Image: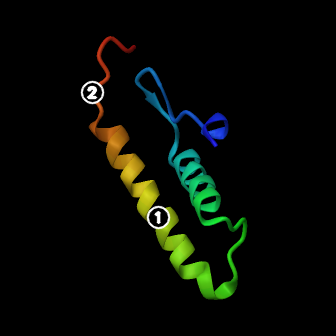
């Protein structure tokens, strides 16, 4: 799993929001075992993607990157 994880920060540059959401979606797919959830699981799947996206955005905005351009 680690080989396919996308880096979302290079120096001081953070990936755009759509890349962060795509990475969150990839993570939820991997841990849930569902590439595309059934209709009865769609809401919880999307809620997980949203929560992870927000957590990563908080992480990126809170990081202090010293010595970066």
Distance of label 2 from label 1 (alpha carbons): 24 Å
Q: The C terminus lies in which quarter of the figure?
A: top left
**Where 34 falls versus 53 (above or below)?**
below
Left or right of 7, for residue 56: left
Check residue 50 in the rendering and tell me which mark sits there, or answer none: 1
Asked if disc 2 and disc 1 are in contact, CB closer than 8 Å, the reply is no
Residue 41: x and y in percent read 60, 82
- Residue at (44%, 57%) from the top-left corner? 52
Side of 52 where 66 appears, left or right: left
Query: Measured along the vertical axis of the image, is residue 11 above or below residue 32?
Result: above
Q: What residue did someone put label 2 on?
A: 64
Colour pattern of the rendering = rainbow
Residue 4 numbered mark, or none:
none
Within 10 Å of disc 2 (Cα), the crowding (few <14, some 14-19, many 20+) is: few
The N terminus, quarter of image: top right
For label 2, the SS is: loop
Residue 19: image x %, image y %?
A: 58, 45
Q: Residues within 10 Å of mark 1 (few under 14, many from 20)?
A: some
* Occupied quadrant, residue 63: top left
- Please name the residue shown 69% across and 68% down the image: 34
Of the numbered discs 2 and 1, the one sitting upstream in the chain is 1
Pick the residue in front: 63 or 13.
63
Q: For the point 58% across and 54% down, which residue is it? A: 27
């Amino acid at each position: 799993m680690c080989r396919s994880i996308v880096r979302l920060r290079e120096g001081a540059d953070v990936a755009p929001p759509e890349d962060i959401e795509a990475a969150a979606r990839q993570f939820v797919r991997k841990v849930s075992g569902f590439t595309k959830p059934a209709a009865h699981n769609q809401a919880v799947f999307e809620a997980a993607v949203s929560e992870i996206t927000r957590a990563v955005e908080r992480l990126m905005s809170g990081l202090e990157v010293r010595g970066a351009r």
